[in-house]
Amino acid sequence: MKKSTFLIYVTYIFSKTLVGLTFHPFKSMTETLRRPILLPVILTPFVGVVILFAAGKIASLLIVVYGLKREVIAMFLSTTLVSILFWQALLLYILISFTASSLKRK
């Protein structure tokens, strides 16, 4: 398999799993646990938080805003941060509960 074909395949599987975890996390989590190589996809929201903080820091260095614009930007960033953290907490809760239930079955 060529490197470019493999990269496209990995990107497709990663994106498919990430979209699945976004819109129907229970079903996608069971698929992820069947294929443990996809477990790093569960930690993707942490990468989003890092990107969010980096983008906020870079933007604050490049753009200086005052007044209402500053409050709107702060509201957007804080809302995004809270939603990403709740999504990550949900994914970790589902992972722990599915792992615990599978251990009880054995």
Image (cartoon, helix red, strand yellow):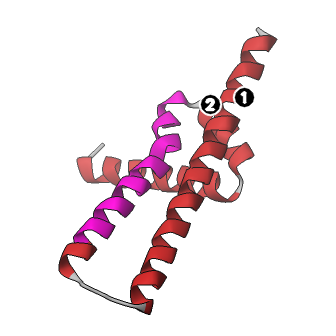
On residue 33, which mark appears? 2
Q: Residue at x 36, y 53 (%)?
A: 50
Q: Position of residue 5 (x, y in %)?
A: 32, 52
Q: Position of residue 72 (x, y in %)?
A: 48, 84
Q: In the image, is residue 63 above or below residue 29?
A: below
On residue 98, which mark appears? 1
Q: Position of residue 42 (x, y in %)?
A: 53, 42
Q: In the image, is residue 66 above or below residue 74?
A: below
Residue 98 lies in quadrant: top right
Quarter of the image that includes the C terminus: top right
Q: Position of residue 23 (x, y in %)?
A: 68, 59
54 in the magenta segment? yes
Residue 78 is left or right of residue 92, and the answer is: left
Q: Earlier in the sequence, mark 1 or mark 2?
A: 2
Q: Tell whether label 2 touches label 1 (CB within 8 Å).
A: yes
Secondary structure under tag 2 reads helix
Residue at the extreme front = 67
Q: Residue at x 30, y 87 (%)?
A: 65
Q: Residue at x 65, y 33 (%)?
A: 95
80 in the magenta segment? no
Mark 2 is on which residue type?
Leu
Secondary structure under tag 1 reads helix
The residues tagged by marks 1 and 2 sit, at their Cα atoms, a distance apart of 8 Å
Quarter of the image that includes the N terminus: top left
Write the start and end of the magenta stretch as one range. Answer: 36-58
Residue 101 is left or right of residue 32, and the answer is: right
Mark 1 is on which residue type?
Phe
Residue 99 lies in quadrant: top right
Residue 59 is left or right of residue 14, and the answer is: left
